[in-house]
Amino acid sequence: MLMRAQPSPPPERPEHMPKGIGAALTDVFAGAVCSILSIAYCLSYAALIFTGPLAHSLSYGVAMTFLSAAVAGAVVALRSSLFFAVAGPDSSISVIIAAMVATLGRRMAADGHGDLLEATLVVTALATAATGIVLCVLGITRAGRAIRFVPFPVLGGFLGATGWLMITGAVQVVTDRAPAIVTIGSYANLGDASKIAAALVVAAALYFMTLRSKSPFVLPGLLLAAFAAAHVALPIIGTSPATAQAAGWMFTPQPAAALALPWKTNAFSGLSWNLLPTLSGDLLAIVFVTVSTLLFNTTGIEIATKSEANIDHDLKVMGFANILSAALGGYVSSTSWSRSVLIRTAGANTRLAALTVAAISAAMIVLDPSFLGYVPKYVLGGLLIFLGWGLVYQWLIQSARQLPRLEYLSLVAIALLIINWGFVAGVLIGIIIGCATFALSASRVNAIKFSFDSAEYRSSLDRGPREQAVLRDHGRQIQGAALQSYLFFGSANRVYQNVKALLAQQPDCRFLIFDFRRVTGIDSSATQSFAQIKQAASNAGAKIVLADLAAEMERLFRAAKFISDDVVVAPDLDRALETCEEKIIELYRAPDGDSRSFRTWLAEALGDPDLGDRLAEHCRHLEIKAGDVIARQGEPAASMHFILEGRVGITVDRPDGRTTRLRSLGRHTTVGEMGLLSRQPRSATIQAETASVLYELDAQAFERIKREDTPLSQALLAYVLTVMAERLNFANGVIGVLQR
């Protein structure tokens, strides 16, 4: 049962369970206290289901309900991952079973034949067995939490409608007539109005007292008080129980009912099997609400008792309990939030407490059903109204402050559909509404995480001043977008609209990069928008580059014939940027850009040919093969290197033995300058990625420059500071792009 109130935290379970008679008595006491609430629930659910045409079989319904509570309670008590868990029939599930039985009764009455009780037993047994099988499958496959992916408006509308149907069911319990809009005026007579008012008083007392006190003992205490008050009031007003029974204030005394297994040949032969398709929606609704109730209640129990449950194990346990209950003639049960928290708070320390609840439920089966003649209908009706109002308030009222307007309106619409046309139409249309709402909401999420161009966001390859200048001047010819979320027609179309606007603003765009690293999935409809993007890029003379494309996404693009010779697929964004940068640099590089000598480069870097020549005298020429290690992580930093040709990579060693590349450095860049200045151990490994030509300035030469050539020392330090400032400035620009 889904409850609103959260109780005070229960006492922690001790590491060493208390043993002996005292501990056993504590568990029995906790089970007895919990049984008060369990008996009240079972009576109210039986009255809810066995009403109208089945009112004369209420004693059988009561026995059947206690049988379900006993079987499910015993199995869960013995095998649940929570030693104090209590299971039994649940309010939300009972409402759907009542709706299914009512539909079955109407269909059989229209056919004019058949035993409604036997048909009810067969259908509920089938529903219970099917639910048990589904629970077992979900537990075995570890798929139980998939229910959380049901659109929230569908789930909320479903439970909100269940609460309303529970309230209308309570009215039928206390007045013996099903409420309807056309007959609402008939409840104005004094007798029915008085009964409904009494039930509302009980419901209000339960509601406000549970708001004021978080103790789980309040609910069973109030129910006992309500039962006692009814019988104290009878002699005061001069009325006997028989008179109250005749007036409809109490249930009619029921004859003893002998439980029978539903799996009998005559029961199956007497059932009109052509009626089952008309009940399929209710059967599916029972399975759906049982799974969701079990998951919600288990989560609530974990929070309230500071315990941890094994949900997949408990799904299998509850599945087996329902299969056994179906075999013995019971109906669907679930783990109960209120009863489990109550028994834990009452002092349960072992499984004996929950077994006590199951044993008392079993004892109720053999109790003389004539006791029903002393049960006030309005007390059970008030309990049903209280439970139903909790669902209505939580899902149809309170959610108005928590949900966006569109989702809330969808939730209310789904609830109204279920109330008016039943669970099948409501859930099916609700899923359609939920999917449409989700699609609309998702389409509002910008599929572009951030946009960039290579003037401000470049690859991790450090480049020399001339290449950096080329990218500063022409980097906007490389435009990119980091995509995110799930791409479908709506969100992909927004990407297309952005690309059209971008190409209009940047008519000289040569490369259009799309980074798919943050994309969780893509459907076939999105490829249509990308086909439009490809056409727009082709018209503008831009080439499309796809980066970090998952295998499934690449397969979808290839199936749509999107990937062709004019579309580049790169393993990641860094490689995509590097490839495009090389093309731009190659296009705009000065004729002598690659042929500068080491001395010419140093002259430009230091701003004086003489200083460049003097620094070159202190450097040692090195020719490095691809893969050679130039410096290792953790070694003393004894030199810096000027990279004239080739490319080196900077990597760090990870604790698991693997390495991670931080960046690469190309021609006319330097590496190791910070280590040389700080004299700290190397923080990373420097390794040649291609055959390279380097010039090394070691620590001794650097110290000699500082001692003997102050102008050169100052120029070298100024160059190093310039390099570091450029790197810091670029890093700040990248951070700015990522924060868009």
Image (spheres, grey):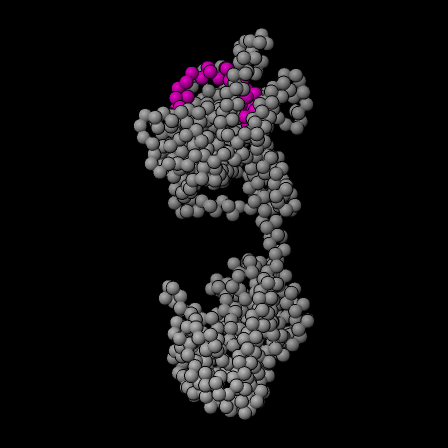
Q: Is residue 68 left or right of residue 428?
A: left
Query: How far across and down, in percent of the image, does residue 262 sit?
Result: 41, 28
- Which of the 4 image quadrants contains residue 185? top right
* Residue sitting nearer the eye, 93 or 654: 654
Q: Residue at x 57, y 66 (%)?
A: 735
As drawn, which residue projects farthest toward the top? 238
As drawn, which residue projects farthest toward the front? 707
Q: Magenta span: helix, strand or loop, mainly?
A: helix
Instruction: Answer whether residue 372 is magenta in the image.
Output: yes
Q: Is residue 241 left or right of residue 257?
A: right
Instruction: Answer whether residue 217 is magenta in the image.
Output: no
The quarter in which the C terminus is drawn is: bottom right
Q: Residue at x 45, y 80 (%)?
A: 640
Query: How far across and down, in percent of the image, does residue 109 sit?
Result: 54, 26
Query: How far across and down, in percent of the image, does residue 286 sit?
Result: 49, 36
Query: How far across and down, in percent of the image, does residue 739 sit?
Result: 59, 63
Residue 610 seen in the figure: yes
Q: Residue at x 59, y 60 (%)?
A: 447
Highlighted magenta segment, given as a residue range: 360-386
The vertical placement of 595 against 449, above or below, is below
Q: How many marks on residues?
A: 0
- Which of the 4 image quadrants contains residue 487? bottom right
* Residue sitting nearer the eye, 48 or 471: 471
* Residue sitting nearer the eye, 244 or 84: 84
Q: Residue at x 58, y 37 (%)?
A: 394
